[in-house]
Image (cartoon, rainbow, N blue to C red):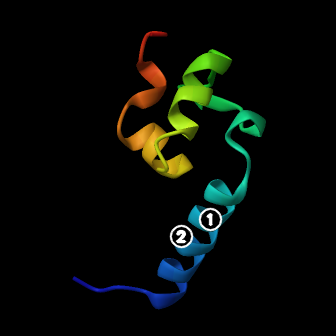
Amino acid sequence: MRVNLEEVQKNLNQRSKWNSTPLEEIEFYERGVKIEIPKEIINQFERTGLNNIDFISSGYYKREIS
């Protein structure tokens, strides 16, 4: 596998930007359609100590309000 270090740095910079933006300020889209995520789901997630990328990669954003 060939790895372009400039591409890795570009991706790391983007990840940093995603994680440093307050979660409630991010507009999430899937297949071009904006996803409405209830504020309570965001509030619950913020208490986990995980980052914004984990919010998506774990599927947490799909949870029901508990």
Q: Position of residue 8 (x, y in %)?
A: 47, 79
Residue at position x 43%, y 10% in the image: 64
- Residue 31 in view, yes or no: yes
- Residue 36 in view, yes or no: no
Work out whether 9 lies above or below 57. Answer: below
Q: Position of residue 1 (x, y in %)?
A: 21, 82
Residue at the farthest right position: 25
Q: Which residue is mark 2?
A: 11
Depth check, front residue: 47 or 50: 47
Q: Which residue type carries mark 2?
A: Asn
Work out whether 11 lies above or below 65. Answer: below
Q: Which residue is mark 1?
A: 14
Residue at the farthest left position: 1
Work out whether 52 lies above or below 43. Answer: below
Residue at position x 55%, y 47% in the image: 52
Q: Disc 1 versus disc 2: distance between alpha carbons? A: 5 Å
Answer whether labels 1 and 2 touch (C-beta < 8 Å): yes
- Element type at marker 1? helix
Depth check, front residue: 27 or 49: 49
Residue at position x 62%, y 67% in the image: 16
Q: Position of residue 20 (x, y in %)?
A: 69, 59
Q: Residues within 10 Å of mark 1 (few under 14, many from 20)?
A: few
Q: Residues within 10 Å of mark 2 (few under 14, many from 20)?
A: few
Q: Position of residue 14 (x, y in %)?
A: 62, 65
Q: Is residue 5 left or right of residue 23?
A: left
- Element type at marker 2? helix
Residue 49 circle label: none
Q: Which quarter of the figure has residue 26?
A: top right
